[in-house]
Amino acid sequence: MGIDANDPLVQLKITSATCSFCALGATVYRLYKRQVRLGADDVWALFAFVVQIIQVAAVFLHIPGPNNLSKTTRIAVPYLMGTTFYATVWASRLSILFSIVRIDPSVERRRRLFWVAAAFVATALFLIGQLLWICEARPSWKNVEHPQCALPLQVAICQFVTDIISDSILLFAPLLLFRDLLDKSLRRKLSLIFSTCVVTTIVSLVHAAFLLRNSGINIAISATVEGCLSLIVANIPVININDRYW
């Protein structure tokens, strides 16, 4: 039997495989490049790397079909998809944040960024907790043939607000650092690289829109794209900047 490209699950698997290949490949290159000088930003990138692999495994648990899985596994897959999505996105943001910390010579600014990092971790835990709380409070979805926890409006709103705030922080946090750089070429390059956070913001808006409209498989596909893009963006500063600056 051939692959039906119109099958939503097949589309999800193709998206997951393609995007994850790029994201994981970028992370492998990043870790290879930084193997002798690993920092907190690399640790968070590695964490996102591992979580992304788990997400791919969750997506492909549907092969050759959900009916071949036990009920427990079918219920676990939506939880894995949701938690790994949040973990990948926020670990990637933490990687970007600690990339800024690594190159910022100001002790005071670095101290503030550590508090921001703590807020990012707390936000990720809150969003994961919200997901689990909502899905466990309405267990009827577990009894259908293809379990999928439908998320209410409040989840989309929380995700939208936290995405906008966090990406804005990552976009504007390096500005004071850039002003202190004497190398104008490096300053322009860093500004361009860190501005790629806007890309993840745009994708997160699309994902939030699908959540608001309860668009079924499009929610999972857009979440997969957002997670992978977040990890790719987190790797861009390290991949594109000369080692002497890190």
Image (cartoon, rainbow, N blue to C red):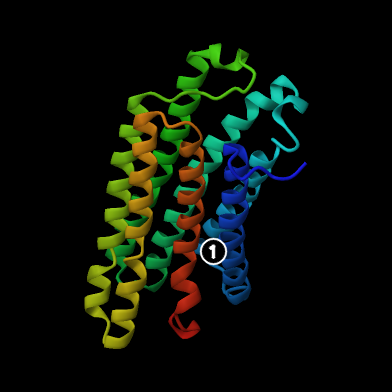
Residue 218 point in image, percent of width and height: 47, 38
Residue nearest the viewer, comparing 59 with 95: 59
Residue highlighted by disc 1: 42
In this view, 174 is above or below 46: below
Q: Quadrant of residue 20?
A: bottom right
Residue 6 position (above or below residue 154) = below
Instruction: Indicate the secondary structure of the residue bearing disc 1.
Output: helix
- Residue at the location (65% across, 42% down)? 4
Can the viewer see residue 132 in this picture?
yes
Give 113 or 223, whichever is nearer the viewer. 223
Which amino acid, mark 1?
Asp
Vertical relation: 135 (above or below) 79: above
Judged left or right of residue 172, residue 41 is right
* Residue situated in front as seen by the camera: 46 or 106: 46
> Residue at horizontal 28%, vertical 55%?
169
Residue 12 falls in image quadrant: top right
Q: Residues within 10 Å of mark 1 (few under 14, many from 20)?
A: many
Residue 131, image x, y percentages = 47, 28
Percent position of residue 124, x then y: 43, 40
Where residue 237 appears, as percent x and y from the top left, is 43, 71
Residue in view at x 27 percent, y 47 percent? 165
**Residue at the (43%, 27%) spot, across then down:** 130
In the picture, measured across the screen, residue 143 lies left or right of residue 88, that is right
Name the residue nearer the viewer: 53 or 143. 143
Image quarter of the N terminus: top right
Q: Is residue 92 left or right of residue 33?
A: left
Total labels: the figure holds: 1
Q: Does residue 136 appear left or right of residue 69 in this picture?
A: left
